[in-house]
Image (cartoon, rainbow, N blue to C red):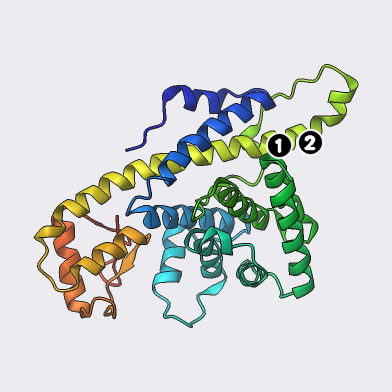
């Protein structure tokens, strides 16, 4: 399991300059990259759990009341093709980031879909301009310039910072060669509170003129570093739970149990209130299987309800 060294946690929390922030962010992303490249069987559940956290943060920033549990309900308890509501659409946008191949995320078709999920009216010309700008950033800018440029491009086109963080996460995954994106910036505070008290040292008029840009960069790097550490911590937690699930899997005798195990490893959560076509199991069979998994300590019931129960690592 991945563990974050204490020196790295201190470096992230005590960074006082842009240079400190850059070193801490680079070290945190390097540690996260090691987790991504292990290609664990439970990586899908890990990314989708991070997507849920990002959706909840986005909902709060939009003044909505849905928490993670309500957003999870809006997705899992809505039948395919039905309206899952504005909150559910936010979750769909972040799930899209975590599930689709990173190389497909910034195509015009995918950008059109995700912008609609974020509540923006369709505008093919604006999407085309945005996609062109992102391609130029991806091919010509350094990593920091690419990330700050993605956020600035989203704001300039009227899509706001939340969409900008989605784009920045997607571009980071492409730059690092990840097959799938790990949602990071979306779950971080929208305000500058997380970087309050951080100084930008300036020693000349020229440096003072550049300070606002340095502060913006620093305000991106430190939240990104904190998000990377939280993602690593979550990977450690889910990795232990996944090991337990895989350890008890041979004890399961139900037909279709293997497909259920793979779904649990690939998704944030699973509902057992209706039959599963992939497993061929009935509602009752699924509920019995999940009761057995809870008895064995391999999964948790996440809703706290006696009906419409939801299960996950």
Q: Position of residue 242 (x, y in %)?
A: 26, 51
Q: Which numbered tag is attached to residue 99?
A: none
Q: Residues within 10 Å of mark 2 (few under 14, many from 20)?
A: few
Q: Tell me if I can see residue 86 in this picture.
A: yes
The reply, left or right, for residue 282 in relation to residue 57 is left
Furthest residue to the top? Answer: 203
Q: In this figure, which residue is indicated by the disc labeled 1? A: 217
Image point (72%, 61%), residue name = 159
Q: In this figure, which residue is indicated by the disc labeled 2? A: 213
Q: Pick whichever, 23 or 121, lies toward us.
A: 23
40, above or below 2, in the image? below
Q: Quadrant of the C terminus?
A: bottom left
The reply, left or right, for residue 136 in relation to residue 288 is right
Q: Quadrant of residue 284?
A: bottom left
Q: How many marks?
A: 2
Q: Residues within 10 Å of mark 1 (few under 14, many from 20)?
A: some
Image point (69%, 53%), residue name = 161
Instruction: For mark 1, give the secondary structure.
Output: helix
Disc 2 from disc 1: Cα separation: 6 Å
Q: Pick whichever, 306 or 278, lies toward us.
A: 278
Mark 2 near mark 1, Cβ–Cβ under 8 Å? yes
Q: Quadrant of the N terminus?
A: top left
143, above or below 291, in the image? above
Q: Quadrant of residue 250?
A: bottom left
Instruction: For mark 2, give the secondary structure.
Output: helix
Image point (57%, 60%), residue name = 103
Q: Pick whichever, 298 or 130, lies toward us.
A: 130
Q: Position of residue 272 (x, y in %)?
A: 27, 72
Q: Tell me if I can see residue 311 in this picture.
A: no
Q: Position of residue 308 (x, y in %)?
A: 30, 72
Furthest residue to the bottom? Answer: 81
Q: Pick whichever, 23 or 300, lies toward us.
A: 23
């Amino acid at each position: 399991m991945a563990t974050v060294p204490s020196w790295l946690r201190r470096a992230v929390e005590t960074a006082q300059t842009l240079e400190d922030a850059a070193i801490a962010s680079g070290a945190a992303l390097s540690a996260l990259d090691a987790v991504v490249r292990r290609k664990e069987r439970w990586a899908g559940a890990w990314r989708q759990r991070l997507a849920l956290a990002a959706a909840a943060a986005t909902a709060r920033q939009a003044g909505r009341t849905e928490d993670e549990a309500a957003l999870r309900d809006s997705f899992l308890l809505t039948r395919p093709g039905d309206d899952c509501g504005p909150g559910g659409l936010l979750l769909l946008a972040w799930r899209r980031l975590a599930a689709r191949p990173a190389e497909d995320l910034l195509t015009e078709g995918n950008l059109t879909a995700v912008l609609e999920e974020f509540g923006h009216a369709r505008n093919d010309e604006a999407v085309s301009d945005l996609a062109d700008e992102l391609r130029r950033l991806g091919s010509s800018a350094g990593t920091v310039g690419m990330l700050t440029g993605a956020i600035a491009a989203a704001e300039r086109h009227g899509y706001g910072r939340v969409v900008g963080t989605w784009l920045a996460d997607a571009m980071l995954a492409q730059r690092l060669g990840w097959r799938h994106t790990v949602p990071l910036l979306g779950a971080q505070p929208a305000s500058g509170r997380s970087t309050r008290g951080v100084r930008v040292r300036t020693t000349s008029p020229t440096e003072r003129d550049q300070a606002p840009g340095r502060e913006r960069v620093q305000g991106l790097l430190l939240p990104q570093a904190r998000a990377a550490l939280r993602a690593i911590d979550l990977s450690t937690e889910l990795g232990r739970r996944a090991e337990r699930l895989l350890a008890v899997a041979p004890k399961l005798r139900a037909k279709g149990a293997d497909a259920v195990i793979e779904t649990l490893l690939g998704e944030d959560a699973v509902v057992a209130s209706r039959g599963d076509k992939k497993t061929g199991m009935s509602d009752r069979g699924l509920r019995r299987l999940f009761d057995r998994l809870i008895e064995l300590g391999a999964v948790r019931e996440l809703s706290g309800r006696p009906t419409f129960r939801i299960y996950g690592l």
